[in-house]
Image (cartoon, rainbow, N blue to C red):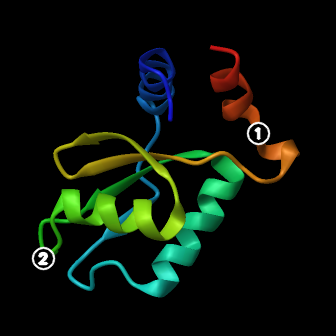
Amino acid sequence: MLSTKQIKFLKKEAHHLKPIFQIGKGGVNEEMLVQINQALEKRELIKITLLQNTMEDTEHVASILTQQLHIIVVQIIGHTLVLYKQSSTPKYRHISEKVKNI
């Protein structure tokens, strides 16, 4: 688990990020989970937006992603999720190294 200071740092880091995935009426599928996991592996911190035409609830999507990908949901703002996962590849661990030092 992350401390309050670490979560605050991640929120600050994510503020300028643009959402790189959009969940529409198709909902969350297996292919999307793979793509989100790959993006987290390279970036460690991403944003996802739920479109208005989706039947999915933000909290439900957050719980699916947490269970399937073992990520940390840093923040939920309206229909936007901020996700964090430490990269398994050391060369991509830019953010997690900073988080560890907090």
User: Where residue 60 is drawn, which disc sits there?
Assistant: none
- The location of residue 9, given as percent across then percent down, is 50, 20
Q: Amino acid at mark 1?
A: Arg
Q: Which residue is mark 2?
A: 55
Residue at x 20%, y 58% (from the top left corner): 58
**In the image, is 54 to the left or to the right of 47?**
left
Q: Which residue is mark 1?
A: 93
- The location of residue 97, given as percent across then percent down, is 74, 28
Which residue is nearer to you in this view: 53 or 9? 9
Which SS class for mark 1?
Answer: loop
Residue at x 46%, y 33% (from the top left corner): 14
Relative to 73, say whether 33 is above or below: below
Q: Residues within 10 Å of mark 2 (few under 14, many from 20)?
A: few
Quadrant for the C terminus in the image: top right
Residue at x 26%, y 43% (from the top left corner): 76
Residue at x 52%, y 65% (from the top left corner): 69
Q: Amino acid at mark 2?
A: Met
Relative to 47, say whether 8 is above or below: above
Which SS class for mark 2?
Answer: loop
Give the quarter of the image for residue 48. Answer: bottom left
- The location of residue 38, given as percent across then percent down, is 65, 66
**In the image, is 67 to the left or to the right of 70?**
left
> How far apart are the alpha carbons under marks 2 and 1?
34 Å
Query: Does label 2 or label 1 sit earlier along the sequence?
Result: 2
- The location of residue 70, given as percent across then percent down, is 52, 59
